Amino acid sequence: MDIPRVQRDVKQFPTRSQYKGTWDLLGMSGYGVYKFPNDVVYEGEFDDGMFHGQGELKYPSGERLRGTWKKGQLTNRKLIFADGLEYSETDWMYCRMPDRRFTIEYDNGLQPAGQSYLTAEQPSRTIPTGYYDTGDGFYDPLTKVVYKFDDLTAILRSPSVREQKWIIENCRTSPDIPLGPRKDLYEEWVEPQVLLPEPSAPASTCKATETLGSYYVNGTDQEITNDRSGLFLRNWRISSGILWDH
């Protein structure tokens, strides 16, 4: 049974969110625009008061997340950056080991030492002392919230404990703190195994010989060999004094 839908004016919620679109008896249903307190906007389909169907989240920084929702759960997604670059979860070439370049460094090339691009957006923002640049605002580790770039009294959002840890470990801060080596950004190196030749035996015990030929002596095959002391006949037993070439 289809429930009839009606169009209403903008609805303001106690959470400071607002919605403009169609409704039915169960709530937001059909097509509409939902704006969150942090200015993120969802535009798309609704059902039973939830995101349901095709829609797009638009962020103040310009990024867009297109996707398919089912009863409020995102089932398919595509992230598009502010400059139009589409993010690929399977074949992504930017900021991946061992290449740490991001988009602007691919477009404009690497800059000389001391003039490197600190961020993709130019010019890079000046970070207030003690804050971290999260890309969408400034994070204060004392209050544990993210503020707007242009108003440090306006709370943008409250990141999770996991994200707070990530921000402190990865985001730019002021004053600059040397990060040191980042093992997670480089390949694993293995100590080389050098195989050295075995040392030669002392000259007094050297037994290396070279066979030069064989001869027939008194009915016995013999070898003529060469070592460092010269030629000699191995096991040469003289009986008749006759040496036959074998």
Image: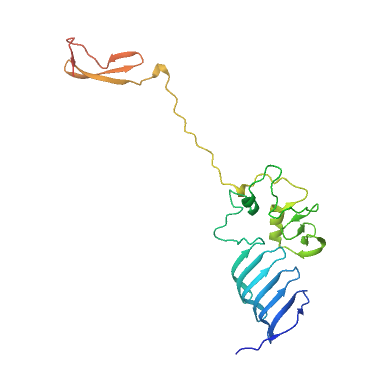
Quick one: 125 or 230, which is closer to the camera?
Answer: 125
Q: How many marks?
A: 0
Q: Residue at x 70, y 80 (%)?
A: 21
Quadrant containing the N terminus in the rendered view: bottom right
Depicted 240 relative to depicted 99: above or below: above
Report x, y in % for residue 216.
19, 17
Spot the residue most to the front: 108
Quadrant of residue 72 within the rendered picture: bottom right
Report x, y in % for residue 5.
67, 86
Relative side of 126 to 87, left or right? right
Q: Residue at x 71, y 75 (%)?
A: 34
Depicted 149 relative to depicted 179: above or below: below
Spot the residue most to the right: 153
Quadrant of residue 234 within the rendered picture: top left
Report x, y in % for residue 26.
68, 85
Depicted 33 relative to depicted 161: above or below: below
Report x, y in % for residue 108.
64, 50
Quick one: 233 or 161, which is closer to the camera?
Answer: 161
Depicted 225 relative to depicted 87: above or below: above
Relative side of 216 to 159, left or right? left
Query: Which color mode does the image show?
Result: rainbow
Spot the residue most to the top: 241
Quadrant containing the C terminus in the rendered view: top left
